[in-house]
Image (cartoon, rainbow, N blue to C red):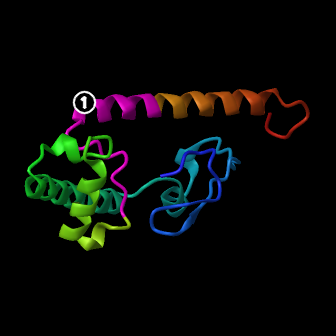
């Protein structure tokens, strides 16, 4: 996938990929006060996590089959492995319905690294939210500040 600074590049699928560097924020003073329906708009729901897991399992199974078919270790056909491209092509031949799915972030065989990345991500989000709250509180003359 293209990096954040590569707006307008063409992806392998032939689709143009662009990234919007702007982020919109909604300040919610107390999320516990939101109605349940509105909360579902902000956070992933359990059924979505179950769908993500099923897709991850399908991708993992297809990669294991691709590695076996190619006579390689699973880590060699991962996205950063020495045979990543061949592994991806073999995985798509095995399960064509996965061609639009991304293997990035799955970290197949990298459970500890995924856990560390998750913890760093959560920390970064919390830090950013705290920064935005400080900025919002420091704005003179704004309602609620």
**Residue ID for mark 1:** 112
Q: Classify residue 30 by image quadrant.
A: top right
Is residue 117 a member of the stretch shown in magenta? yes
Secondary element under disc 1, as helix, strand or loop, is helix
From this viewpoint, which residue is outermost toward the bottom? 97
Quarter holding the C terminus?
top right
Magenta part of the chain: 101-121
* Up/down of 34 relative to 139, above or below: below
Q: Residue at x 62, y 58 (%)?
A: 18
Q: Classify residue 138 by image quadrant.
A: top right
The crowding category of the residue bearing disc 1, from other C-alpha atoms within 10 Å (few below 14, some 14 to 19, many at least 20), is few
Left or right placement of residue 132 versus residue 49 in this view: right
Q: Residue at x 9, y 58 (%)?
A: 69
- Which is more toward the observer, 49 or 89? 89
Residue 59 placed where, x, y %? 23, 58
- Which is more toward the observer, 35 or 80? 80
Left or right placement of residue 63 versus residue 1 in this view: left
- Which is more toward the observer, 44 or 70? 70
Q: Classify residue 134 by image quadrant.
A: top right
* Up/down of 131 relative to 27, above or below: above
Residue 96 placed where, x, y %? 26, 72
């Amino acid at each position: 996938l293209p990096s954040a600074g590569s707006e307008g590049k063409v992806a392998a699928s032939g689709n143009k990929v662009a990234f919007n560097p702007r982020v919109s924020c909604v300040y919610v003073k107390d999320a516990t006060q939101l109605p349940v329906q509105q909360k579902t708009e902000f956070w992933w729901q359990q059924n979505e996590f179950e769908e993500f897991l099923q897709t991850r399992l399908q991708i993992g199974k297809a990669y294991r089959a691709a590695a076996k078919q190619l006579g390689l270790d699973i880590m060699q056909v991962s996205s950063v492995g020495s045979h990543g491209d061949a592994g991806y092509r073999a995985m798509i031949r095995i399960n064509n319905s996965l061609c639009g799915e991304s293997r990035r972030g799955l970290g197949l065989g990298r459970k500890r690294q995924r856990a560390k990345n998750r913890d760093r991500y959560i920390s970064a989000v919390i830090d950013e939210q705290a920064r935005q709250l400080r900025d919002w509180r420091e704005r003179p003359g704004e309602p609620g500040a």
